[in-house]
């Protein structure tokens, strides 16, 4: 972690997936459940880990297209399972559609948070106004917050669909400021994505804390974090 002279922040804006809500753990638990309930062993997919690996690679590629505006979310939801099943020689459109619907019903209800997230939010609560800015699907982000027990810590939950723009588009950051009556100079964006969260906030004139546990953080970020607890000497 790199420390800089600490500014006086009033508003903290968090990304949700991969920053507070443990997307990887929750998603993998969901996919493992689906692997068994859909009887994929009987369909010739003998290894749940191989199925999960294939899904995650395909989903990453499709999500990149979605975030760049080249793929509609409803198409993404079906394609990621259709293409994963095809990897194992399974051509079954009803199954792909059903798994896409099941995934969206099950995954948001999972409650795993990133290490240290809950205790940090408890300690920050009352000291700062806290908000969420997320590119995640509008209809499931609220469920994630409620089921993981952290919804009450945030004044504003702004999704890209509500804002009409996705991070790193400066319009979503401008909307966040307008909705919260915050100013850029006293706002801090905390997120894991170097482009969507960090570059986006920097372009909007905000300070940024890049949460990057496994790879080097953006060298231009105001703060680099390996653990969420690294925010404590900055904010507490």
Image: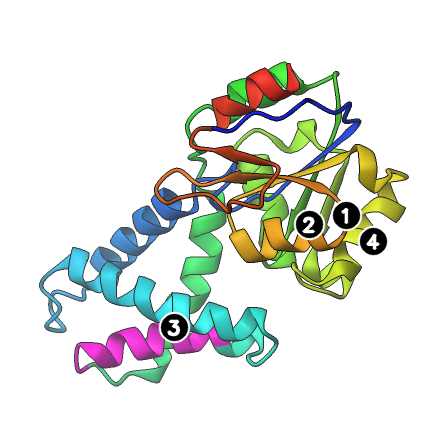
The label on residue 80 is: 3
Q: Are marks 3 and 2 in contact (CB under 8 Å)?
A: no
Q: Residue at x 74, y 17 (%)?
A: 127
User: In the displayed structure, does residue 20 sit left or right of residue 39?
Assistant: right
> Percent from the top left, x then y, of residue 161?
71, 63
In 3D space, how far apart are the residues under numbered discs 2 and 1 (Cα atoms)? 5 Å
Q: Are marks 2 and 1 in contact (CB under 8 Å)?
A: yes
Mark 1: which secondary structure? loop
In 3D space, how far apart are the residues under numbered discs 4 and 1 (Cα atoms)? 14 Å
Mark 3: which secondary structure? helix
The label on residue 205 is: 1
Residue 42, image quadrant: bottom left
Per the image, the residue denoted by label 4 is 175
Taking the image as drawn, is residue 1 in sight? yes
* 4 or 1: mark nearer the eye: 1
Q: Are marks 2 and 4 in contact (CB under 8 Å)?
A: no
Q: Earlier in the sequence, mark 3 or mark 2?
A: 3
In 3D space, how far apart are the residues under numbered discs 3 and 1 (Cα atoms)? 35 Å
How are the residues colored? rainbow
Q: Earlier in the sequence, mark 2 or mark 4?
A: 4
Q: Residue at x 12, y 65 (%)?
A: 41
In 3D space, how far apart are the residues under numbered discs 3 and 4 (Cα atoms)? 31 Å
Taking the image as drawn, is residue 77 in sight? no
> Which stretch is magenta?
76-89
Asked if 2 appears above or below 43 in the picture, the reply is above
Q: Residue at x 58, y 73 (%)?
A: 68
| Magenta-drawn stretch contains 222 | no
What secondary structure is the stretch in magenta mostly built from? helix
Per the image, the residue denoted by label 2 is 202
User: In the displayed structure, does residue 171 sit left or right of residue 169?
Assistant: right
């Amino acid at each position: 972690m790199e420390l800089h002279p600490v500014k006086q922040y009033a508003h903290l804006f968090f990304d949700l997936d991969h920053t507070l809500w443990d997307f990887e753990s929750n998603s993998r638990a969901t996919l493992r459940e689906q692997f068994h309930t859909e009887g994929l062993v009987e369909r010739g997919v003998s290894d749940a880990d191989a199925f999960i690996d294939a899904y995650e690679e395909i989903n990453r590629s499709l999500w990149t297209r979605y975030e760049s505006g080249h793929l509609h979310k409803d198409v993404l939801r079906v394609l990621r399972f259709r293409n994963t099943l095809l990897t194992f020689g399974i051509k079954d459109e009803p199954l792909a559609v059903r798994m896409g619907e099941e995934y969206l019903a099950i995954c948001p209800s999972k409650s795993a948070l990133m290490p240290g997230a809950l205790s940090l939010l408890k300690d920050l609560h009352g000291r700062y106004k806290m908000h969420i800015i997320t590119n995640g699907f509008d209809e499931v982000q609220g469920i994630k917050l409620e089921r993981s027990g952290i919804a009450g810590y945030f004044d504003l939950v702004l999704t890209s669909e509500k804002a009409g723009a996705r991070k790193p588009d400066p319009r979503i950051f401008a909307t966040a400021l307008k909705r919260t009556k915050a100013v850029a100079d006293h706002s801090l964006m905390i997120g894991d994505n170097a482009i969507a969260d960090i570059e986006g906030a920097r372009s909007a004139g905000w300070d940024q804390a890049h949460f990057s546990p496994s790879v080097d953080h953006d060298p231009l970020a105001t703060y680099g974090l390996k653990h969420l607890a690294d925010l404590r000497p900055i904010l507490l």
